[in-house]
Amino acid sequence: METAQREWSLVSTHGAVLLFVAAHPNSTLREIAESAGVTERQVARVIKDLTRAEIVEMAHRGRRNTYAVNKDAYFRRPLLAHIRLERFISALLPELVDAKAVELRSE
């Protein structure tokens, strides 16, 4: 008899939303939801959590929102509290770090 495996993910919904927003700061709730595999309502709650925790800043630009990740913030979980988000993001999305370096060099 085969046992059904439970669904789980190494990165939580909050982590997936954070990473997507870091890579796509002008994205819509729908785009974020599609990427994270959750509903727009769940994304709205996650964004609210992240803004309250001062991990993400949201700015209104006309009818759209833009997002900025506070890379100087630290993880909230005690085991990871010594890790800055910048290290986490650059480890999982190195292309963002590379793109930023190219952008800075071209200025």
Image (cartoon, rainbow, N blue to C red):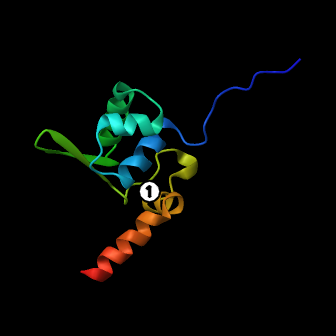
Relative to 41, residue 26 above or below: below
Q: Nearer the viewer, residue 76 or 55?
A: 55
Residue lying farthest to the top in this orientation: 1
Q: Residues within 10 Å of mark 1 (few under 14, many from 20)?
A: many
**Residue 75: percent from the left, percent from the top?**
47, 50
- Looking at the image, residue 77 sits to the left or right of residue 34; the answer is right
Q: Name the quadrant of the N terminus.
A: top right
Relative to 104, residue 27 above or below: above
- What residue is at 46 percent from the left and 58 percent from the top? 89
**Residue 92: percent from the left, percent from the top?**
52, 57
The residue carrying mark 1 is 85
Q: Nearer the viewer, residue 4 or 74?
A: 4
**Residue 95: percent from the left, percent from the top?**
46, 65
- What residue is at 43 percent from the left and 71 percent from the top? 98
**Residue 43: percent from the left, percent from the top?**
37, 32
- Looking at the image, residue 72 sits to the left or right of residue 26; the answer is right
Secondary structure under the numbered disc 1 in the rendered image: helix
The total number of labels drawn is: 1
Relative to 66, residue 40 above or below: above
- Looking at the image, residue 33 sits to the left or right of residue 91; the answer is left
Q: Name the quadrant of the C terminus.
A: bottom left
- What residue is at 41 percent from the left and 42 percent from the top? 17
Residue lying farthest to the right in this orientation: 1
Q: Amino acid at mark 1?
A: Leu
- What residue is at 85 percent from the left and 21 percent from the top? 2
| Rendering quarter of residue 11 | top right
